[in-house]
Structures are given as structure tokens and as C-alpha cells.
Amino acid sequence: MKVVAALSGGVDSAVAAARAVDAGHEVVGVHLALARDRAQERTGSRGCCTVEDARDARRVADVLGIPFYVWDLSERFAEDVVEDFVSEYAAGRTPNPCLRCNERIKFSAVLDRALALGFGAVCTGHYARLVEGPDGRELHRAVDDGKDQSYVLAVLDADQLAGSMFPLGGSTKDEVRAEARRRGLLVADKPDSHDICFIPDGDTAGWLRDRLGSAPGDVVDAVSGETLGTHEGAFAFTVGQRRGLHVGRPAEDGGRRYVVGVDVGSATVLVGPPVLLEVDRIEGERARWCGPAPAGPVEVDVQVRAHGERIPGVLERDGAAVRVMTRERVRGVAPGQAVVAYAGTRVLGSATIARTSRA
Amino acid sequence: MTQFPVYLDHAATTPMRPEAYTAVTEHLLEVGNASSLHAPGRRARRVVEESREAVAAILGVRAGDVVFTSGGTEADNLAVLGLYRARRAEDQRRTRVLATAIEHHAVLDPVERLGEHEGADVRWLPVDGCGRLDLDALKSELAAAPETVALVTVMWANNEVGTIQPVAEVAALCAEYDVPLHSDAVQAVGTLPVDASTVDSLALSGHKLGGPVGVGALVVRRGLSPQPIVFGGGQERDLRSGTLDVPGVAGLAAALLASMGDLEVRAHHLRTLRDRLVAEVVESVEGVTRNGDPDDGLPGIAHLSFAGCEGDALLLLLDAAGIAVSRGSACSAGVPQPSHVLLAMGVEPLAARGSLRISLGHTSTGDDVDRLVEALPPAVARARRAGTGR
């Protein structure tokens, strides 16, 4: 098969491409230029798609002996990922741009282009497994649970999965690094990327302030209704956040306070004890199913943030909306993040968290 | 059956001519620094000076006018930065730089730098739809305040669309107003008859004319002393320091000499191939526009826009079919930007994205053209299915 291997310049995508070559596919390396103004160099593990990353990706392609091109998707990325990120925060939610990028860019814009140009699949270095099941292709968690990235892929529908290739799902990160070294790939020891690739200095609050302006408001105690302090913009706060609240006084019981709610309309950040964070009902919207949608209530395990733990519960679907009742209470469920439903290791689908409550 | 690759990117770099290969390899194992006084040094010096004389004779200038550099880019940088600084030092009023909007980045970027960091008042001169300089615009800029012009820079022939510039007319205007003229002739030398004495300074590059990479020259008339941009041992008239590359210089001269030998025959051959290529592509593919001047352009360049597709996609598909073409001008990070040349010519940005530069050279054959003409229609159809991505 003709395969487009997305090469970020990192170790995972390099080894994934190498394995696709070994599997006998006709592989073409493609580096995605996503940022409009690209930094020249990486700073540690922050950011991606710098000019240095593009060079590293090109070297990987050289070593593998495959063609290499840069595809400029910066316009689509700005519209579909960055603008969405800003407007979600402006609405008081906490989006996960990686899911959005996978849904709209890597396995949509890139995949569509690849298919039109005569390729059969897009190969990436994500840690997840594709399994051929009775109802078609299934998305499963990676073998390396610590590295599993099925959460950020849970937006892919059956068509998108049909055009995907994840050669690393059966390996651990250590194995992948060792293999990169064995193959003579110079990116073997490059640090992993973290944080948000288009905010290279990692200062999300500052980045958002530049775009949304400051919108000062009060920090209010959710229990007493007392105003405890002020903030520069409610968008900088996420449900479950503990740091950066700047409320001078400790809580009366001496415990720590957390952000328990964000109301952008009144510019209010509600804080309170951790017990207020505990919920067992999660309502999601914009559901996406990695295969057939569930017909009735199903027993699932849900994950509410990347690399979070899985909690058992029951999922009900109502059109594009879902409701999950968890068997135990779960903390720090932030609207805007995805709730991802699993049956065992299999990913059923995902939805964007809209509301949470407690029975 | 795998076929031989088809190389149609001669404007990027062209295969080395056998004469140049012989000259380079002949001197590669010889020791001797051309600046040394002993016998090996003298031997090296002699090779350099004979090469200089050969280059000068071909270009119609004196040997002393030829300054060897590391390539076309350095030659352009030396001319632009060096002439601006020297002319400005003589007279502080000389702040204006007049440059065509379609210069190569080797000129464009130093000019922009002068504007950003050294107080230059840069005037980008417009071109017409064929990519030819608007002489009236140049004339009015010159006439407005000739005493404030540091230099004029007009390329001999454009590297993307191939349009030949009215250098003689530009030179006459510059002479009238007593302003120095630099010309980037990297694409012209070796392909067109170039009389370097027409202009005050002229850049050329070895590998574009069948010589080695890493060597070029600035022809700069005496009496015009650009300030150096590379400092050191003062080789090359104190205009350019650095140990002379004896094999490179010998290879450049040998390639230039060889290219003069078949200049007219080759131009005719390339024009015939190119015109057939364009005619057959236009016939077999719908929505093709030819960019540049169809009558007065470099004989080996065909610059074509394909409506409704991305040039990148076409390049990928042709590459997979073993055919090497270009988007226009290469970019270090490989991120395509709409070509400033096409935009200056008034081509719509979307159309500019769907364009390819196909450039033939001294090794091109009718078979190359056949292969391209055969591969292009399915590639365009497929690239159109992929769309413009917007």
C-alpha cells in the first residue's frame, strides 16, 4: 500500500515510518507545517514543528530512504484548532487541541489529501492499536498503558480509522527508543513533546490573555458566597485547578481550595473544597463513535482527561449527546475536555464534556 | 521496468560539464595556496589567473574586474551590501535602493536587510504581467532625485519564470543619472550572450552553468569599490577574503568556456524542446496557464500554472513517477510560500500555488519531454481531486 507517514521530527513518528517501510509499504514522509510563524529551534520538550523539527524529520526520511515533503496546513490548523481553542476558553471550557487536531487535521485534511493523491493510509507514531473486529476496524489502547494515546484518537470515526496506521501500539516507549537507536535514527534520544504545540513557552494563560484581553472578575467561595479575591480573566482557570488562585486566606477548615466552577458571563471563578469537585454524572455533546454507535445503555469505563484513570460507569446515548453515570465519584472533570468511553481496551467513542453533576 | 529519472530542474542546478569535471579533478590533488610565494603557490596562482582571464574575456570585461566568490549568493550580497555601504559612506544622501520586485532572494534579502537595519529607503520596481521591469517606473524613481540613489539592481533573467530583463535600457538610464547598476545574471550567464561591461557589477554562479557548486564571481568594474562583507587575508582585490578555491575556479572557467562553445545551438535545441513541451501540455491538460514572456525568456524554462490544484501535490506525484521538477525557488524549510515573482506579476495567490517550473538544460532530450508530457495529465487529474486544500 502507498502510505503517507506523518513525520514530526520526533522519535515515535520516525520509528512508525520505519516499521511501515519494513512492512513492505511504499512510504512517503510528510512533515506538517502547522504554525504560521515557526520558531527556529525547540526549547526542551516544548512545542513542535519548528524549523529544527522539519530538519530532523527530513533526516529521518533520508535515513529511511523515502521521499520527504512538507505540507503546509497552517491555515487549516489556525481555523480548526487554534481558533476553536481560543473560543472554547472564551466560553469557559478547557479544550484539548490534540483531539481536535487529530479529528480535523491529521485524519481529515491530511488523510483526505493523501487518499486523493492515491495513498491508502496515514501512518503516525501514536501509541494505540487497530484491531480488525467483526464489525470492522476497532481502536484499542496501546500495550504501554503509561504511553497510551487512545484518548486523543477517540474522535476518529470508522472511515478515519480505515485510513489510519499506528505501528507503535504494540510497543513500549523504551522499545521504540531502543529501536530508533538500533536503526541509526538520530532522533532516538530527543525529548518527548509535551504541552500545547502552538504555545511554545507553555504559558497558556499569558497566551490566552494576549488574544482575549484581560477580563477581571472575582474569585468567590462556592460555599460561603464570599468574595476572596480577583483574577485577570476567568478563561485562565480550569475546574480542578489548585495553583495560581491567589486567595490570601486559607479556607476555614484549613484545607486547600480548588476551582470548582468557571462562569465567564459574570467573570466569576468559584473555588471550594475538593469535595465539590466530586461528580458522578457527566453530560457530553458532539459525540463521535469509533465504529457503530451504542444502541442502548452500555457498561463502560470512562476516561475524562489524557492519561487519567478509567472509571467504570454506564453510558447512554441520545443522538449526538451522551450521559455517563459513574459508579464512583470522580474529581476534576472539566467542561471542554473529552469523556472517552472504553469497553475493555477498545475505544467506543468520545464526547465533549458539557456539564457535570452529582446524584 | 524502472526508467531513468527525468531531470527537469536545471535552473536549480545542472549536471557538471565534462570539461569542468576534468578541470576540477585535475587540480584537486595539487597542493598550493594561490597566495603563497613559493613554486606550488605560483602554480595555483597561475591556474586562478588564467581562469580569471578566460572568464573576463567571455564576459567582455578586464581580468581585474572579476572577483571570485563562494557562489552567486555571496556575489549578490557583496554587490548589494557593499555598494550601498560604499556609496552611502561617500555621500550620506544616497539612501535609496531601487530593485525589481522579482529579484532572487540573494538580492531581495540583503536589500530588505538594508531597509531594516541600515536606513535604506527601498523602492521595489514593478513588473508587467510577463515579469518584465516597468522602465517608466525606474525612470521616474531615478529622475525624482538621482543624487539620493545608492544603487539600482535588476536581474538579467528571472530564475522562476525566465523573463529576460531590459538590461541595456536600464543601463542607459543608470548611466544618464550616474547611478551604479548591479545585475544578478546567475540564470543568464552560460545560457544567453552576456556582455558584463553593460553593467557596473554582475553576479554569476558556477553550478548553474555546468561548473562546480561553491564557486561564483562578481564582476565589478574598476573605480567602483564595494565595501567587503568577508574580511581576512585580502585576496581578490581586498574585496573578498578567503583562500582561493583553485579547482573550483578552474571548473567555473572550463564550464563557462564549454557553454560558450554551444551557446546558440543549445539555445535553439532547448527552445524547440521547451516549445513542444508547452504545446503538448496545453493540448493534453485543461486549465493550464503559461507564466513569463513567451517570446523573450530563457530558452529552457517553462513556468506553468494548473488551475485547481497545488503545485506541491503535482511535484510529489511527478517525483513518484521519476520526474524532477520544481515549485519555482527552493526554500530551506521546505514550506511553500506563494512566489513573490508571480505575485508581482499579478498572478492570483491561488493560481500561484498551482504552478510548476520545468527547466531544461544541456543534457535534456526529447525523451525527457515525452516522459513529462505522458506523466502530467494523470498527475494533474489526481492533484485536482486532492484540491487546493482550502
Image (tube, coloured by chain):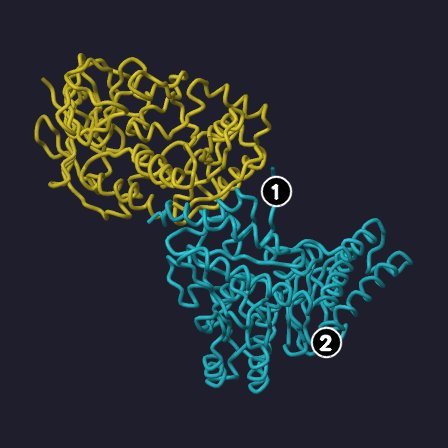
Chain colours: A yellow, B cyan
Label 2 environment density (alpha carbons within 10 Å; few <14, some 14–19, many ≥20): some
Q: Residues within 10 Å of mark 1 (few under 14, many from 20)?
A: few
Which residue is found at the position 26% from the left and 33% from the top? A244
Give the letter of the chain under mark 1: B
Please indicate whether residue B334 sits to the left or right of residue A275 in the image.
Answer: right
* Number of the front mark, 1 or 2: 1
Return the x and y of residue B74 as percentages of the image width and height: 63, 61
Query: Can you give x and y, in whole percent of width and height, for residue A93 in the image?
Result: 20, 35
Q: Amino acid at mark 2?
A: Gly
Q: Is residue B267 above or below residue B176?
A: above
Which residue is labeled 2 in the image? B60
Q: Check the residue under mark 2 and report the chain it is in.
A: B
Which is more toward the observer, A107 or A8? A107
Label 2: element kind: loop
The answer to whether residue B10 is seen in the rendering is: yes
Q: Which residue is mark 1?
A: B3
Q: Nearer the viewer, residue B378 or A292?
A: B378
Q: Total marks drawn?
A: 2
Q: Can residue B154 be seen from the camera position used here?
A: no
Farthest right residue? B39
Residue at (61%, 73%) from the top-left corner?
B86
Vertical order, B264 against B250 (above or below) = below
Residue A292 position, x and y percent, is 24, 22
Residue drawn at (20%, 18%) of the image: A330
Give me the residue at 51% from left, 61% from top. Answer: B278
Disc 1 marks a residue whose amino acid type is Gln
The vertical placement of B227 against B105, above or below, is below
* Nearest the eye: A282 or B131: B131
Q: Is residue A88 left or right of residue B274?
A: left
